[in-house]
Image (tube, helix red, strand yellow):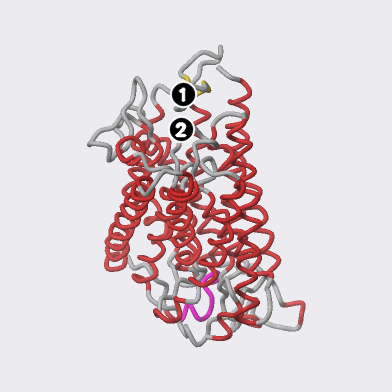
Amino acid sequence: MNAGDTAWILVSAALVMLMTPGLAFFYGGMVRSKSVLNMLMMNFVALGVVGVLWVLYGYSLSFGDDAFGGLVGNTSKAGLSGTVTSALGTGPTQADPVGHQYPELAFVMFQLMFAIITVALISGAIADRTRFWAWMLFVALWATIVYFPVAHWVFAFSSDTTVGGWIANNLKALDFAGGTAVHINAGAAGLALAIVLGKRVGWPKDTGRPHNVPFVLLGASLLWFGWYGFNAGSALTAGSLASVAFTTTTVATAAAVLGWLLVEQLKFGKPTTLGAASGAVAGLVAITPAAGFVNPIGAVAIGLIAGVLCALAVSLKFKLGLDDSLDVVGVHLVGGLTGTLLIGFFATTEVNSAGANGLFYGGGFDQLGKQAVAAFAVLGYSFVITLVLGFLIKITIGFRVAKEDEVAGVDEALHAESAYDFGGLGTSGGLTGNASRPTGAHSALEGTKA
């Protein structure tokens, strides 16, 4: 048992947990003031739903011994059977691919936080118009049918006692911390749900602005902070690889901020606070799969490319007629694809001997091909299954709020609450004084232009 590694994993799990409230503020600042509580709740309840499912069967399906040819784990660890350490400090330990030892429950909690944030990410695509209990049902079904199997594909490495998933062990695509399992997975699901629920009332003519930009920047900052647990924590040891992942996460994110702001300056003549926050998230997304496989220069290149591509991608929804409310597709799907594929160019075994050399380091196109197969397999699976789940919920219990509730504000309609009381400012009726303020997207300038 390595106490230092155990401490690092537990701290990292806590950092990743903080990302979900951070995401809630990031998304919450971009929606209407009359739907901010609903947005916060859609993120927060993921902690509750996924947390319970993870204990019952989620961890087992994700990290149990393989059951169907690398597609899903078995139920041997259901109820976290066999993972609990006794009061005397003895009990099962988990070994990562390079042999570091730590309590299995530390790993259980670390990976739980990944499952929670992945589900929460999807909510931004359907902001302002989603029924709360329908969302709760979707979270439970999607985590079970999509996230848990995909996590098995990507994260479950085979050992002397277990057999893991097909992407990690058969295909041998590289994903250090979840570019495929988290970001491509959530981005593809967001695309499917945006199609299922359709456009908001008044969109695209009424594209709107964020109701609270400081919330957005606060949320992005919390995400950046928590992401060190996400990426550096995925080294599963407090050593040199964690230091590399910490460094690449920092410099890629910094470069992505600059890339996004450059696009805004060239397209609109002004850089925005919202653009800086969005660029940071785009960089964090893109470096996630590559954090432990590339050097700092490669990380800067990945971040800069992702910042530019994601900034350009958010414009496409207006041309395509896709109301992805908070640009989950433009940032997480495009950013996840960018980072996953660029591993095939920038990966080097000088950083991580367990990885591979990309094209720029003499590895040819072999690793790039593996990265593409992994990325598009996850994209296709998540999109198709989410589309089916979304339509089933829509035709059974209904997925979207009534039009009048959407216009009046989902906070009052669904939760009987309002985030702000403007009664003392000379307005009446709670939120009615601000009810017409439109919702936001990652680029206020883009929305204004559209």
Pick out the residue farthest to the left. Answer: 68
The percent coordinates of residue 323 (x first, y second) are 44, 75
Residue drawn 62% across the image and 55% down it: 253
Magenta span of residues: 404-412
Q: Which residue is mark 2?
A: 354
**Residue 402 or residue 123, whichever sits in front:** 123
Q: Which residue is mark 1?
A: 94
Q: What quarter of the picture does the N terminus occupy?
A: top right
Q: What secondary structure characterizes most of the magenta part?
A: helix
Can you tell which mark lies on residue 26?
none
Could you tell whether 226 is left or right of 365 in the image?
right
Q: Label 1: how many residues lie within 10 Å, few (<14), some (14-19) or many (20+)?
A: some
Could you tell whether 301 is left or right of 347 in the image?
right
Label 1 sits on a secondary structure element that is: strand
Q: CA distance from mark 2 to mark 1?
A: 18 Å
Residue drawn 32% across the image and 37% down it: 165
Does 207 appear above or below 418? Answer: below
